[in-house]
Amino acid sequence: ESFKVFPNPATNFVSLEFPSAVFTSVQLIDISGNVLLEKKVEANTSHLAFNLGKYPPGFYWFAAKSKQGKTASAKMIKQ
């Protein structure tokens, strides 16, 4: 499974869209591998929004964990 991150690049707010409700949590990770935040994904959730205003411009990853323990990731740029 995969998910979409938009807009990309982003300034303050970014949304994640899940094609199906298979993910249980999402992490925001910086270029150094530090987990900056983690959100639990409620059942039947197809969208999540993140406020990135407090983070400096740069490259980030979102990593989503599935119910089966697999991880999907997506890169994004914060301007």
Image (tube, rainbow, N blue to C red):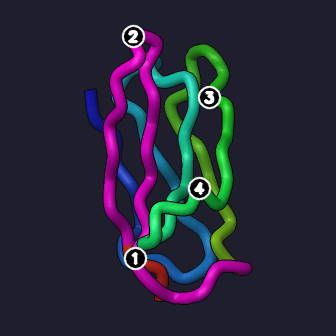
Which callout, 1 or 3, points at the residue further toward the start of the chain? 3
What distance separates the C-alpha of mark 1 from that of mark 2?
27 Å
Spatial CA distance of label 3 from label 4 is: 16 Å
Residue 51, numbered label: none
Nearer to me, 55 or 16? 55
Position of 17 relative to 69 (above/below) = below
Residue at image coords 32%, 53%: 74
Q: Which residue is mark 4?
A: 35
Q: Which mark is residue 59?
A: 1
Residue position marked by numbered label 3 in the rendering: 41
Question: In 3D space, how far apart are the residues under numbered discs 4 and 1 (Cα atoms)?
Answer: 13 Å
User: In what element is the residue under mark 1?
Assistant: strand
Q: Earlier in the sequence, mark 3 or mark 4?
A: 4
Q: Which residue is mark 2?
A: 68
Q: Which residues are magenta?
A: 54-76
Type of amino acid at the residue the image marks with label 2: Gln
Which is nearer the N-term, disc 4 or disc 2? 4
Residue 1 horizontal side relative to residue 44, left or right: left
Which residue occupies 40% across, 76% down? 59
Mark toward the viewer: 3 or 4: 4
Looking at the rendered structure, the kind of residue marked 1 is Phe
Instruction: For marks 4 and 2, give the one nearer the viewer.
Output: 4
In the rendered structure, does residue 56 fall within the stretch colored magenta? yes
Spatial CA span between label 2 and label 3: 14 Å
